[in-house]
Protein backbone atom coordinates (compact mmCIF):
# COMPACT_ATOMS: atom_id res chain seq x y z
CA UNK A 1 0.00 0.00 0.00
CA UNK A 2 1.38 3.39 -0.96
CA UNK A 3 2.13 5.89 1.77
CA UNK A 4 0.26 9.14 1.45
CA UNK A 5 2.46 12.23 1.69
CA UNK A 6 1.57 15.92 1.51
CA UNK A 7 2.98 15.97 -2.00
CA UNK A 8 0.74 13.07 -3.04
CA UNK A 9 -2.33 14.68 -1.54
CA UNK A 10 -1.98 17.96 -3.39
CA UNK A 11 -0.32 16.93 -6.63
CA UNK A 12 -3.40 16.89 -8.86
CA UNK A 13 -6.27 19.38 -9.17
CA UNK A 14 -8.90 16.76 -8.30
CA UNK A 15 -6.94 15.75 -5.17
CA UNK A 16 -6.80 19.37 -4.00
CA UNK A 17 -10.52 19.84 -4.66
CA UNK A 18 -11.36 16.59 -2.88
CA UNK A 19 -9.32 17.64 0.17
CA UNK A 20 -11.25 20.92 0.25
CA UNK A 21 -14.61 19.19 -0.20
CA UNK A 22 -14.02 16.81 2.70
CA UNK A 23 -12.62 19.52 4.96
CA UNK A 24 -9.12 18.04 5.04
CA UNK A 25 -7.70 21.27 3.59
CA UNK A 26 -8.77 24.80 4.50
CA UNK A 27 -5.67 26.95 3.81
CA UNK A 28 -4.25 28.63 0.74
CA UNK A 29 -3.57 26.91 -2.58
CA UNK A 30 -0.18 28.42 -3.53
CA UNK A 31 2.15 25.81 -5.10
CA UNK A 32 -0.58 23.15 -5.07
CA UNK A 33 -1.24 21.05 -8.19
CA UNK A 34 1.72 22.63 -9.97
CA UNK A 35 1.24 23.13 -13.70
CA UNK A 36 -2.52 23.73 -13.46
CA UNK A 37 -4.31 27.08 -13.65
CA UNK A 38 -5.92 28.42 -10.48
CA UNK A 39 -8.83 30.85 -10.52
CA UNK A 40 -10.55 33.63 -8.59
CA UNK A 41 -14.20 32.89 -7.75
CA UNK A 42 -17.09 35.36 -7.82
CA UNK A 43 -20.65 34.15 -7.09
CA UNK A 44 -23.61 36.46 -7.75
CA UNK A 45 -27.39 36.12 -7.93
CA UNK A 46 -29.13 36.01 -11.31
CA UNK A 47 -30.20 39.67 -11.35
CA UNK A 48 -26.55 40.76 -11.40
CA UNK A 49 -25.11 37.88 -13.43
CA UNK A 50 -25.70 39.36 -16.91
CA UNK A 51 -24.21 42.74 -15.96
CA UNK A 52 -21.18 41.04 -14.42
CA UNK A 53 -20.64 38.84 -17.47
CA UNK A 54 -20.82 41.91 -19.73
CA UNK A 55 -18.37 43.67 -17.39
CA UNK A 56 -15.91 40.79 -17.79
CA UNK A 57 -16.26 40.90 -21.59
CA UNK A 58 -15.58 44.66 -21.65
CA UNK A 59 -12.64 44.45 -19.23
CA UNK A 60 -10.74 41.30 -20.19
CA UNK A 61 -7.42 42.38 -18.66
CA UNK A 62 -8.59 42.65 -15.03
CA UNK A 63 -11.43 40.10 -15.55
CA UNK A 64 -10.19 37.25 -17.76
CA UNK A 65 -13.15 34.87 -17.68
CA UNK A 66 -11.99 31.25 -17.64
CA UNK A 67 -15.39 29.72 -16.94
CA UNK A 68 -18.96 30.60 -16.00
CA UNK A 69 -21.80 28.40 -14.81
CA UNK A 70 -25.36 28.12 -16.02
CA UNK A 71 -27.77 29.90 -13.65
CA UNK A 72 -28.24 27.71 -10.56
CA UNK A 73 -25.49 25.26 -11.53
CA UNK A 74 -22.33 24.94 -9.42
CA UNK A 75 -20.32 22.87 -11.91
CA UNK A 76 -17.59 24.63 -13.93
CA UNK A 77 -18.13 22.48 -17.02
CA UNK A 78 -15.31 23.89 -19.10
CA UNK A 79 -12.43 23.99 -16.63
CA UNK A 80 -13.23 21.18 -14.13
CA UNK A 81 -16.14 18.95 -15.17
CA UNK A 82 -17.61 17.20 -12.13
CA UNK A 83 -16.27 19.75 -9.63
CA UNK A 84 -18.53 21.75 -7.31
CA UNK A 85 -17.90 25.46 -6.71
CA UNK A 86 -19.86 25.29 -3.43
CA UNK A 87 -17.42 22.92 -1.71
CA UNK A 88 -14.20 22.59 -3.71
CA UNK A 89 -12.37 25.72 -2.56
CA UNK A 90 -10.53 25.82 0.78
CA UNK A 91 -12.33 28.98 1.92
CA UNK A 92 -14.99 31.52 0.97
CA UNK A 93 -15.92 35.07 1.92
CA UNK A 94 -19.55 36.12 2.07
CA UNK A 95 -20.38 39.78 1.44
CA UNK A 96 -23.81 41.28 2.14
CA UNK A 97 -24.60 44.77 0.85
CA UNK A 98 -20.91 45.27 0.12
CA UNK A 99 -19.67 44.37 3.65
CA UNK A 100 -17.80 41.22 4.69
CA UNK A 101 -20.41 39.23 6.64
CA UNK A 102 -18.99 35.73 7.03
CA UNK A 103 -16.11 33.36 6.24
CA UNK A 104 -16.92 29.74 5.42
CA UNK A 105 -15.37 26.57 4.05
CA UNK A 106 -18.60 25.49 2.31
CA UNK A 107 -21.34 27.62 0.72
CA UNK A 108 -23.86 24.89 -0.10
CA UNK A 109 -26.45 26.40 2.26
CA UNK A 110 -26.17 29.81 0.56
CA UNK A 111 -26.44 28.53 -3.00
CA UNK A 112 -29.92 28.51 -4.51
CA UNK A 113 -31.37 28.12 -8.02
CA UNK A 114 -30.57 31.76 -8.86
CA UNK A 115 -26.80 31.76 -8.27
CA UNK A 116 -24.11 31.88 -10.96
CA UNK A 117 -20.38 31.26 -10.49
CA UNK A 118 -17.58 33.03 -12.37
CA UNK A 119 -13.97 31.81 -12.50
CA UNK A 120 -11.40 34.45 -13.40
CA UNK A 121 -7.76 33.86 -14.30
CA UNK A 122 -5.24 34.39 -11.50
CA UNK A 123 -1.73 35.77 -11.56
CA UNK A 124 -0.37 32.66 -9.78
CA UNK A 125 -0.36 31.27 -13.31
CA UNK A 126 1.75 33.89 -15.04
CA UNK A 127 4.14 34.15 -12.09
CA UNK A 128 5.23 30.60 -12.81
CA UNK A 129 5.87 31.56 -16.45
CA UNK A 130 7.95 34.55 -15.29
CA UNK A 131 9.97 32.36 -12.91
CA UNK A 132 10.51 29.84 -15.71
CA UNK A 133 11.93 32.71 -17.79
CA UNK A 134 14.43 33.48 -15.02
CA UNK A 135 12.65 36.60 -13.75
CA UNK A 136 12.77 36.85 -9.94
CA UNK A 137 9.54 37.24 -7.94
CA UNK A 138 10.67 39.44 -5.03
CA UNK A 139 7.55 38.74 -2.95
CA UNK A 140 8.07 34.98 -3.25
CA UNK A 141 11.65 35.31 -2.01
CA UNK A 142 10.43 37.40 0.94
CA UNK A 143 7.49 35.12 1.72
CA UNK A 144 5.10 38.05 1.40
CA UNK A 145 1.86 38.71 -0.49
CA UNK A 146 2.09 40.60 -3.80
CA UNK A 147 1.39 44.37 -3.46
CA UNK A 148 -1.92 45.54 -4.96
CA UNK A 149 -3.20 49.10 -5.52
CA UNK A 150 -6.34 50.89 -6.54
CA UNK A 151 -5.61 53.09 -9.57
CA UNK A 152 -7.18 55.97 -11.50
CA UNK A 153 -7.60 53.75 -14.60
CA UNK A 154 -11.33 53.55 -15.31
CA UNK A 155 -12.86 50.20 -16.21
CA UNK A 156 -15.47 50.20 -18.98
CA UNK A 157 -18.78 50.20 -17.07
CA UNK A 158 -21.49 47.55 -17.59
CA UNK A 159 -24.98 47.84 -16.08
CA UNK A 160 -24.58 48.31 -12.33
CA UNK A 161 -20.82 47.70 -12.36
CA UNK A 162 -18.36 50.58 -12.67
CA UNK A 163 -15.15 51.77 -11.03
CA UNK A 164 -11.37 51.77 -11.29
CA UNK A 165 -8.90 49.00 -11.98
CA UNK A 166 -6.87 47.32 -9.25
CA UNK A 167 -3.31 46.38 -10.23
CA UNK A 168 -0.63 44.11 -8.82
CA UNK A 169 2.98 45.27 -8.70
CA UNK A 170 6.12 43.30 -9.37
CA UNK A 171 9.55 44.94 -9.04
CA UNK A 172 11.52 43.67 -12.06
CA UNK A 173 15.25 44.14 -12.79
CA UNK A 174 15.49 46.81 -15.52
CA UNK A 175 17.13 44.45 -17.99
CA UNK A 176 14.28 41.90 -17.65
CA UNK A 177 11.32 44.28 -18.03
CA UNK A 178 10.86 43.72 -21.77
CA UNK A 179 11.13 39.96 -21.27
CA UNK A 180 8.42 40.18 -18.60
CA UNK A 181 6.11 41.80 -21.18
CA UNK A 182 6.89 39.13 -23.77
CA UNK A 183 6.29 36.27 -21.35
CA UNK A 184 2.99 37.49 -19.88
CA UNK A 185 1.63 38.68 -23.27
CA UNK A 186 1.40 35.00 -24.14
CA UNK A 187 -1.22 34.49 -21.40
CA UNK A 188 -4.20 36.73 -22.17
CA UNK A 189 -6.47 34.51 -20.05
CA UNK A 190 -4.50 35.28 -16.88
CA UNK A 191 -4.26 39.09 -17.23
CA UNK A 192 -1.77 39.09 -20.14
CA UNK A 193 0.83 41.83 -20.67
CA UNK A 194 1.34 44.56 -18.05
CA UNK A 195 -0.86 47.64 -18.18
CA UNK A 196 1.84 50.07 -17.04
CA UNK A 197 5.61 50.26 -16.59
CA UNK A 198 7.35 52.86 -14.43
CA UNK A 199 5.90 55.98 -12.76
CA UNK A 200 3.18 54.95 -10.26
CA UNK A 201 1.75 58.50 -10.18
CA UNK A 202 0.79 58.20 -13.87
CA UNK A 203 -1.88 55.65 -12.91
CA UNK A 204 -2.96 57.38 -9.68
CA UNK A 205 -0.79 55.56 -7.14
CA UNK A 206 0.68 58.09 -4.71
CA UNK A 207 2.78 55.84 -2.44
CA UNK A 208 4.12 52.44 -3.47
CA UNK A 209 4.97 51.77 0.19
CA UNK A 210 1.29 51.69 1.13
CA UNK A 211 -0.52 49.11 -0.99
CA UNK A 212 -4.32 48.86 -0.73
CA UNK A 213 -4.08 45.06 -0.55
CA UNK A 214 -1.19 42.68 0.22
CA UNK A 215 2.22 43.53 1.67
CA UNK A 216 4.55 46.47 0.86
CA UNK A 217 6.84 45.78 -2.09
CA UNK A 218 10.47 44.70 -1.80
CA UNK A 219 12.95 45.93 -4.37
CA UNK A 220 16.60 45.70 -5.29
CA UNK A 221 18.63 48.58 -6.77
CA UNK A 222 17.84 48.97 -10.47
CA UNK A 223 14.38 47.42 -10.21
CA UNK A 224 11.53 48.98 -12.21
CA UNK A 225 7.90 48.86 -11.06
CA UNK A 226 5.75 46.85 -13.49
CA UNK A 227 1.97 46.77 -13.01
CA UNK A 228 -0.49 44.09 -14.14
CA UNK A 229 -4.29 44.22 -14.12
CA UNK A 230 -5.39 42.31 -11.01
CA UNK A 231 -8.16 39.80 -10.36
CA UNK A 232 -9.13 41.75 -7.22
CA UNK A 233 -10.69 44.33 -9.60
CA UNK A 234 -14.03 42.57 -10.10
CA UNK A 235 -14.42 42.07 -6.34
CA UNK A 236 -13.63 45.72 -5.66
CA UNK A 237 -16.06 46.79 -8.39
CA UNK A 238 -18.80 44.42 -7.26
CA UNK A 239 -18.38 45.63 -3.66
CA UNK A 240 -18.93 49.22 -4.81
CA UNK A 241 -22.29 48.25 -6.30
CA UNK A 242 -23.21 46.82 -2.87
CA UNK A 243 -25.01 43.69 -4.06
CA UNK A 244 -27.32 42.09 -1.49
CA UNK A 245 -25.21 38.90 -1.69
CA UNK A 246 -21.83 38.20 -3.23
CA UNK A 247 -19.50 35.30 -2.45
CA UNK A 248 -15.81 35.10 -3.35
CA UNK A 249 -12.86 32.83 -2.63
CA UNK A 250 -10.95 33.68 0.57
CA UNK A 251 -7.64 35.46 -0.19
CA UNK A 252 -5.11 32.97 -1.51
CA UNK A 253 -7.66 30.13 -1.39
CA UNK A 254 -8.24 29.71 -5.10
CA UNK A 255 -10.20 27.24 -7.18
CA UNK A 256 -7.80 24.73 -8.78
CA UNK A 257 -8.88 23.93 -12.35
CA UNK A 258 -8.04 20.93 -14.54
CA UNK A 259 -6.58 23.30 -17.18
CA UNK A 260 -2.83 22.85 -17.76
CA UNK A 261 -1.11 26.24 -17.71
CA UNK A 262 0.45 25.42 -21.08
CA UNK A 263 -3.03 25.33 -22.62
CA UNK A 264 -3.57 28.97 -21.66
CA UNK A 265 -0.63 30.09 -23.79
CA UNK A 266 -1.84 31.87 -26.91
CA UNK A 267 1.21 30.92 -28.98
CA UNK B 1 -18.94 71.94 -52.81
CA UNK B 2 -17.78 68.32 -53.11
CA UNK B 3 -19.73 65.97 -55.34
CA UNK B 4 -21.12 62.98 -53.50
CA UNK B 5 -20.36 59.64 -55.16
CA UNK B 6 -21.28 56.09 -54.14
CA UNK B 7 -17.70 55.60 -52.99
CA UNK B 8 -17.91 58.69 -50.77
CA UNK B 9 -21.23 57.64 -49.27
CA UNK B 10 -20.07 54.22 -48.14
CA UNK B 11 -16.38 54.78 -47.46
CA UNK B 12 -16.58 55.12 -43.66
CA UNK B 13 -18.49 53.05 -41.09
CA UNK B 14 -20.43 56.07 -39.80
CA UNK B 15 -21.48 56.99 -43.34
CA UNK B 16 -22.81 53.47 -43.97
CA UNK B 17 -24.69 53.49 -40.65
CA UNK B 18 -26.11 56.94 -41.35
CA UNK B 19 -27.34 55.82 -44.80
CA UNK B 20 -29.07 52.85 -43.13
CA UNK B 21 -30.58 55.01 -40.39
CA UNK B 22 -32.11 57.47 -42.85
CA UNK B 23 -33.36 54.72 -45.16
CA UNK B 24 -31.01 55.70 -48.01
CA UNK B 25 -29.46 52.21 -47.97
CA UNK B 26 -31.32 48.93 -47.48
CA UNK B 27 -29.16 46.34 -49.29
CA UNK B 28 -26.16 44.27 -48.33
CA UNK B 29 -22.92 45.64 -46.85
CA UNK B 30 -20.30 43.63 -48.76
CA UNK B 31 -17.29 45.77 -49.74
CA UNK B 32 -18.62 48.78 -47.82
CA UNK B 33 -16.34 50.74 -45.48
CA UNK B 34 -13.35 48.65 -46.52
CA UNK B 35 -10.86 47.97 -43.75
CA UNK B 36 -13.46 47.92 -40.96
CA UNK B 37 -14.91 44.84 -39.25
CA UNK B 38 -18.53 43.95 -39.93
CA UNK B 39 -20.63 41.97 -37.47
CA UNK B 40 -23.58 39.59 -37.20
CA UNK B 41 -26.39 40.90 -34.97
CA UNK B 42 -28.50 38.86 -32.53
CA UNK B 43 -31.10 40.59 -30.33
CA UNK B 44 -32.77 38.70 -27.48
CA UNK B 45 -34.94 39.56 -24.49
CA UNK B 46 -33.40 39.70 -21.00
CA UNK B 47 -34.55 36.22 -19.91
CA UNK B 48 -32.38 34.63 -22.61
CA UNK B 49 -29.53 37.15 -22.63
CA UNK B 50 -27.43 35.52 -19.88
CA UNK B 51 -27.71 32.05 -21.39
CA UNK B 52 -26.76 33.39 -24.81
CA UNK B 53 -23.77 35.28 -23.44
CA UNK B 54 -22.58 32.13 -21.67
CA UNK B 55 -23.10 30.19 -24.91
CA UNK B 56 -20.85 32.66 -26.75
CA UNK B 57 -18.17 32.35 -24.07
CA UNK B 58 -18.23 28.54 -24.30
CA UNK B 59 -18.23 28.49 -28.11
CA UNK B 60 -15.87 31.27 -29.17
CA UNK B 61 -15.11 29.85 -32.62
CA UNK B 62 -18.68 29.98 -34.00
CA UNK B 63 -19.69 32.86 -31.67
CA UNK B 64 -16.81 35.35 -31.41
CA UNK B 65 -18.39 38.13 -29.35
CA UNK B 66 -17.19 41.56 -30.52
CA UNK B 67 -19.63 43.59 -28.43
CA UNK B 68 -22.69 43.27 -26.23
CA UNK B 69 -25.08 45.92 -24.94
CA UNK B 70 -26.33 46.63 -21.45
CA UNK B 71 -29.90 45.38 -20.97
CA UNK B 72 -32.27 47.80 -22.72
CA UNK B 73 -29.47 49.78 -24.39
CA UNK B 74 -29.07 49.79 -28.18
CA UNK B 75 -25.60 51.40 -28.28
CA UNK B 76 -22.60 49.14 -28.98
CA UNK B 77 -20.25 51.12 -26.74
CA UNK B 78 -17.10 49.19 -27.53
CA UNK B 79 -17.23 48.85 -31.30
CA UNK B 80 -19.25 51.90 -32.45
CA UNK B 81 -19.95 54.46 -29.70
CA UNK B 82 -22.97 56.58 -30.59
CA UNK B 83 -24.40 54.05 -33.06
CA UNK B 84 -27.90 52.55 -32.66
CA UNK B 85 -28.47 48.83 -33.28
CA UNK B 86 -32.19 49.50 -33.88
CA UNK B 87 -31.67 51.61 -37.00
CA UNK B 88 -28.09 51.35 -38.23
CA UNK B 89 -28.26 48.06 -40.16
CA UNK B 90 -29.71 47.93 -43.70
CA UNK B 91 -32.14 45.14 -42.81
CA UNK B 92 -33.42 42.93 -39.99
CA UNK B 93 -35.23 39.63 -39.65
CA UNK B 94 -37.75 39.11 -36.85
CA UNK B 95 -38.30 35.57 -35.58
CA UNK B 96 -41.18 34.62 -33.30
CA UNK B 97 -41.17 31.20 -31.64
CA UNK B 98 -38.38 30.13 -33.97
CA UNK B 99 -40.18 31.08 -37.22
CA UNK B 100 -39.40 34.01 -39.53
CA UNK B 101 -42.23 36.47 -38.89
CA UNK B 102 -41.16 39.74 -40.48
CA UNK B 103 -38.43 41.63 -42.35
CA UNK B 104 -37.77 45.26 -41.46
CA UNK B 105 -35.34 48.09 -42.00
CA UNK B 106 -35.87 49.51 -38.49
CA UNK B 107 -36.63 47.68 -35.21
CA UNK B 108 -37.17 50.67 -32.93
CA UNK B 109 -40.82 49.69 -32.33
CA UNK B 110 -39.83 46.18 -31.23
CA UNK B 111 -37.05 47.24 -28.86
CA UNK B 112 -38.06 47.66 -25.21
CA UNK B 113 -36.20 48.01 -21.90
CA UNK B 114 -35.57 44.26 -21.74
CA UNK B 115 -33.68 43.76 -25.01
CA UNK B 116 -29.96 43.08 -25.37
CA UNK B 117 -27.92 43.19 -28.57
CA UNK B 118 -24.96 40.93 -29.43
CA UNK B 119 -22.44 41.62 -32.20
CA UNK B 120 -20.52 38.59 -33.44
CA UNK B 121 -17.48 38.60 -35.69
CA UNK B 122 -18.15 37.91 -39.37
CA UNK B 123 -16.11 36.06 -41.98
CA UNK B 124 -16.20 39.05 -44.37
CA UNK B 125 -13.28 40.18 -42.23
CA UNK B 126 -11.00 37.17 -42.58
CA UNK B 127 -11.82 36.76 -46.28
CA UNK B 128 -10.08 40.07 -46.90
CA UNK B 129 -7.04 38.79 -45.03
CA UNK B 130 -7.05 35.61 -47.15
CA UNK B 131 -7.32 37.65 -50.37
CA UNK B 132 -4.47 39.87 -49.19
CA UNK B 133 -2.40 36.69 -48.77
CA UNK B 134 -3.08 35.76 -52.40
CA UNK B 135 -5.59 33.01 -51.61
CA UNK B 136 -8.51 32.99 -54.09
CA UNK B 137 -12.10 33.20 -52.85
CA UNK B 138 -13.95 31.04 -55.41
CA UNK B 139 -17.39 32.34 -54.39
CA UNK B 140 -16.30 35.97 -54.87
CA UNK B 141 -15.08 35.19 -58.38
CA UNK B 142 -18.41 33.49 -59.16
CA UNK B 143 -20.51 36.21 -57.53
CA UNK B 144 -22.16 33.61 -55.30
CA UNK B 145 -22.82 33.32 -51.55
CA UNK B 146 -20.40 31.21 -49.50
CA UNK B 147 -21.63 27.61 -48.91
CA UNK B 148 -22.69 26.83 -45.33
CA UNK B 149 -23.56 23.46 -43.77
CA UNK B 150 -24.98 22.08 -40.56
CA UNK B 151 -22.49 19.60 -39.05
CA UNK B 152 -22.38 16.86 -36.42
CA UNK B 153 -19.94 18.90 -34.29
CA UNK B 154 -21.69 19.58 -30.99
CA UNK B 155 -21.48 23.05 -29.46
CA UNK B 156 -21.00 23.24 -25.69
CA UNK B 157 -24.53 23.83 -24.36
CA UNK B 158 -25.45 26.79 -22.11
CA UNK B 159 -28.82 27.07 -20.39
CA UNK B 160 -31.55 26.82 -23.04
CA UNK B 161 -29.08 26.90 -25.95
CA UNK B 162 -27.70 23.70 -27.45
CA UNK B 163 -27.12 22.17 -30.87
CA UNK B 164 -24.57 21.61 -33.61
CA UNK B 165 -22.12 23.96 -35.27
CA UNK B 166 -22.73 25.50 -38.69
CA UNK B 167 -19.61 25.86 -40.86
CA UNK B 168 -18.71 27.81 -43.97
CA UNK B 169 -16.72 26.16 -46.75
CA UNK B 170 -13.98 27.61 -48.89
CA UNK B 171 -12.32 25.52 -51.61
CA UNK B 172 -8.61 26.29 -51.31
CA UNK B 173 -5.78 25.26 -53.67
CA UNK B 174 -3.90 22.40 -51.95
CA UNK B 175 -0.65 24.35 -51.82
CA UNK B 176 -2.34 27.29 -50.02
CA UNK B 177 -4.21 25.32 -47.34
CA UNK B 178 -1.53 25.72 -44.65
CA UNK B 179 -1.22 29.42 -45.44
CA UNK B 180 -5.01 29.76 -45.02
CA UNK B 181 -4.68 28.33 -41.50
CA UNK B 182 -1.82 30.67 -40.64
CA UNK B 183 -3.65 33.74 -41.91
CA UNK B 184 -7.01 33.10 -40.23
CA UNK B 185 -5.43 31.92 -36.94
CA UNK B 186 -4.37 35.55 -36.48
CA UNK B 187 -8.05 36.59 -36.23
CA UNK B 188 -9.63 34.72 -33.30
CA UNK B 189 -12.36 37.38 -33.03
CA UNK B 190 -13.69 36.56 -36.50
CA UNK B 191 -13.79 32.74 -36.21
CA UNK B 192 -10.00 32.19 -36.28
CA UNK B 193 -8.37 29.08 -37.74
CA UNK B 194 -10.45 26.49 -39.61
CA UNK B 195 -12.16 23.75 -37.62
CA UNK B 196 -11.70 21.03 -40.26
CA UNK B 197 -9.71 20.34 -43.42
CA UNK B 198 -10.66 17.65 -45.96
CA UNK B 199 -13.30 14.89 -45.69
CA UNK B 200 -16.76 16.48 -45.25
CA UNK B 201 -18.20 13.19 -43.92
CA UNK B 202 -15.92 13.38 -40.88
CA UNK B 203 -17.98 16.33 -39.62
CA UNK B 204 -21.36 15.00 -40.70
CA UNK B 205 -21.71 16.64 -44.12
CA UNK B 206 -23.03 14.07 -46.63
CA UNK B 207 -23.15 16.13 -49.84
CA UNK B 208 -21.05 19.24 -50.47
CA UNK B 209 -23.25 20.00 -53.48
CA UNK B 210 -26.24 20.68 -51.23
CA UNK B 211 -25.39 23.35 -48.68
CA UNK B 212 -27.91 24.18 -45.94
CA UNK B 213 -27.37 27.91 -46.50
CA UNK B 214 -25.81 29.88 -49.38
CA UNK B 215 -24.93 28.64 -52.86
CA UNK B 216 -23.27 25.36 -53.94
CA UNK B 217 -19.47 25.51 -53.89
CA UNK B 218 -17.31 26.10 -56.93
CA UNK B 219 -13.93 24.37 -57.13
CA UNK B 220 -10.95 24.01 -59.38
CA UNK B 221 -8.93 20.79 -59.83
CA UNK B 222 -6.64 20.26 -56.83
CA UNK B 223 -8.77 22.32 -54.43
CA UNK B 224 -9.21 21.03 -50.87
CA UNK B 225 -12.36 21.74 -48.79
CA UNK B 226 -11.53 23.88 -45.74
CA UNK B 227 -14.24 24.53 -43.13
CA UNK B 228 -14.52 27.46 -40.72
CA UNK B 229 -16.92 27.88 -37.80
CA UNK B 230 -19.74 30.12 -39.04
CA UNK B 231 -21.59 33.04 -37.50
CA UNK B 232 -24.89 31.48 -38.61
CA UNK B 233 -24.41 28.98 -35.74
CA UNK B 234 -25.85 31.17 -32.96
CA UNK B 235 -28.93 31.98 -35.08
CA UNK B 236 -29.47 28.29 -35.88
CA UNK B 237 -29.02 27.39 -32.20
CA UNK B 238 -31.27 30.19 -30.98
CA UNK B 239 -33.95 29.17 -33.50
CA UNK B 240 -33.91 25.62 -32.10
CA UNK B 241 -34.72 26.96 -28.63
CA UNK B 242 -37.74 28.74 -30.22
CA UNK B 243 -37.51 32.00 -28.26
CA UNK B 244 -40.68 34.08 -28.23
CA UNK B 245 -38.78 36.91 -29.94
CA UNK B 246 -35.39 37.02 -31.62
CA UNK B 247 -34.14 39.62 -34.10
CA UNK B 248 -31.10 39.24 -36.37
CA UNK B 249 -29.51 41.12 -39.27
CA UNK B 250 -30.90 40.21 -42.71
CA UNK B 251 -28.51 37.94 -44.65
CA UNK B 252 -25.56 39.95 -45.94
CA UNK B 253 -26.84 43.12 -44.24
CA UNK B 254 -24.28 43.37 -41.46
CA UNK B 255 -23.56 45.97 -38.80
CA UNK B 256 -20.49 47.99 -39.80
CA UNK B 257 -18.31 48.69 -36.75
CA UNK B 258 -15.67 51.39 -36.22
CA UNK B 259 -13.06 48.67 -35.51
CA UNK B 260 -10.22 48.55 -38.07
CA UNK B 261 -9.66 44.96 -39.21
CA UNK B 262 -5.98 45.32 -38.32
CA UNK B 263 -6.95 45.81 -34.67
CA UNK B 264 -8.53 42.34 -34.61
CA UNK B 265 -5.23 40.67 -35.45
CA UNK B 266 -3.82 38.88 -32.42
CA UNK B 267 -0.20 39.25 -33.52
Image: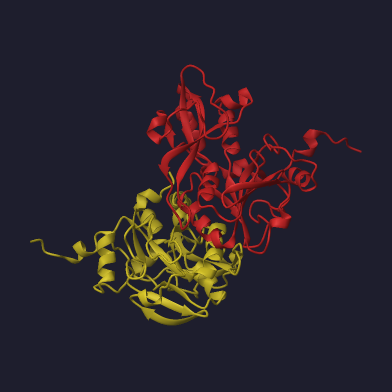
Chain colours: A red, B yellow
For the point 53% across and 47% down, the residue is A234
Residue B1 in sight from this viewpoint: yes
Residue most toward the right?
Answer: A1
**Observer-nearest of A181 and A142:** A142
**In the picture shown, does residue B245 fall above or below A141?**
below
Where's residue B10, x and y in %?
24, 63
Q: As displayed, is residue B23 above or below residue B124?
A: below
Q: Residue A195 at x, y = what percent?
A: 44, 37
Q: Count how many numbered circles sit on residues in the image.
A: 0
Does A19 sit left or right of A130 as displayed?
Answer: right
Tell which residue pokes out farthest to the bottom in this image: B101
**Percent from the top left, x then y, of residue B13?**
29, 60
Residue A166 in picture, x, y percent from top left: 49, 40
User: Quadrant of residue A265 in the image?
Assistant: top right
Task: Name above or below for residue A239 compared with residue B201.
Answer: above
Residue A123 position by quadrant: top right
| Residue B82 figure quarter | bottom left
> Which residue occupies 65% across, 38% down?
A252
Amino acid sequence: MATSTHADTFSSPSMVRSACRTGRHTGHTAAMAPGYAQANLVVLPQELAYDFLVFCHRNPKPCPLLDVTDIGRAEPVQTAPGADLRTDLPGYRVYRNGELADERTDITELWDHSMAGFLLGCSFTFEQALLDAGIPMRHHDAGSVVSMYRTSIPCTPAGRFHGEMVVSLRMIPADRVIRSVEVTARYPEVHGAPIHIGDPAAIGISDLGQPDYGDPPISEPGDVPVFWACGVTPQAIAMQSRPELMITHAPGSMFVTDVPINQLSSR
